[in-house]
Image (cartoon, rainbow, N blue to C red):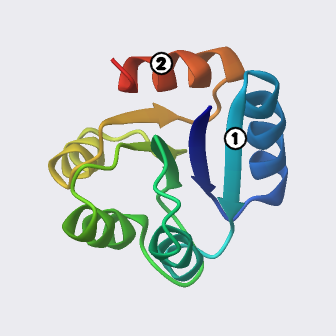
Amino acid sequence: MRTIIVVDDSAVLRTTIENALDSAGYEVLSTADGSPALFRVLEEGKVPDAILLDMFFPEESGLDILRSLKAKYPNVKVLVITGMNNQDLNKEILESGASNILHKPFDMEDLTLALQKLSK
C-alpha cells in the first residue's frame, strides 16, 4: 500500500483528498497544523511515499516547512498544492526541494496522476 501524508489547513480539502486517495488504494494520514504534526508523524517512523503540502498556513510558511522537511528527510517526495500560481513562487518551491506543484483548484484525477508521476 502507498502512504500519503496530506498537510493542509482546509478541513474540506483534506477530507476530499483523503476520500479520493483512500478510494484509489492509498493509506492517507493528514494534519492541519503544518510542521509540528508532520514531523511528529515522520519521527514515529511513518515515512510516506509522498507528502502533499499546502504553502500557506496561519502560523507558518509552507516554504519553511518544505525546507525543514527536505533538510531532515531529503529523499521524501513532496507535491506542493497551492492556490498561488506565480512564476517566482513556483521557482522557489521547486528550488526548495518540491518534486512537483499542483495548483488549486484541481480535480482528483489530476492529483492521482501527479502522485503516479512521483512514483516513477
Q: Give the x, y percent position of residue 98.
A: 29, 45
Residue 36 versus residue 80: which sits nearer the camera?
36
In the rendered image, the residue lying farthest to the left is 95
Residue at which label 2 appears: 116
Instruction: Kindly indicate the quadrant of the structure image that contains residue 107.
Output: top right
Q: Is residue 12 left or right of residue 71?
A: right
**Residue at x-position 69% and y-position 41%:** 27
The image quadrant that residue 29 belongs to is bottom right
In the rendered image, the quadrant that contains the C terminus is top left
CB contact under 8 Å: marks 1 and 2:
no
Q: Earlier in the sequence, mark 1 or mark 2?
A: 1
Q: Is residue 111 above or below residue 103?
A: above
Q: Which mark lies nearer to you, 1 or 2?
A: 1
State how far apart marks 1 and 2 are (Cα): 14 Å
Q: Position of residue 90 (x, y in %)?
A: 28, 42
Q: How many marks?
A: 2
**Crowd rating for badge 1 (residues with CA inside 10 Å; few <14, some 14–19, many 20+):** some
From this view, report whether residue 108 is shown above or below residue 84.
above
Q: Which residue is mark 1?
A: 27
- Identify the disc placed on residue 76: none
Answer left or right for 28 relative to 23. Answer: left
The quadrant of the picture occupied by the N terminus is: top right
Q: How many residues crowd mark 2 within 10 Å: few (<14), some (14–19), many (20+)?
A: few
Disc 1 marks which amino acid?
Glu
Residue at 46% x, 75% y is 43
Type of amino acid at the residue the image marks with label 2: Gln
Which residue is located at x 39 percent, y 24 percent? 119
Q: Label 1: state its secondary structure.
A: strand
x, y percentage for residue 112?
60, 21
Q: Is residue 43 left or right of residue 107?
A: left
Element at label 2: helix
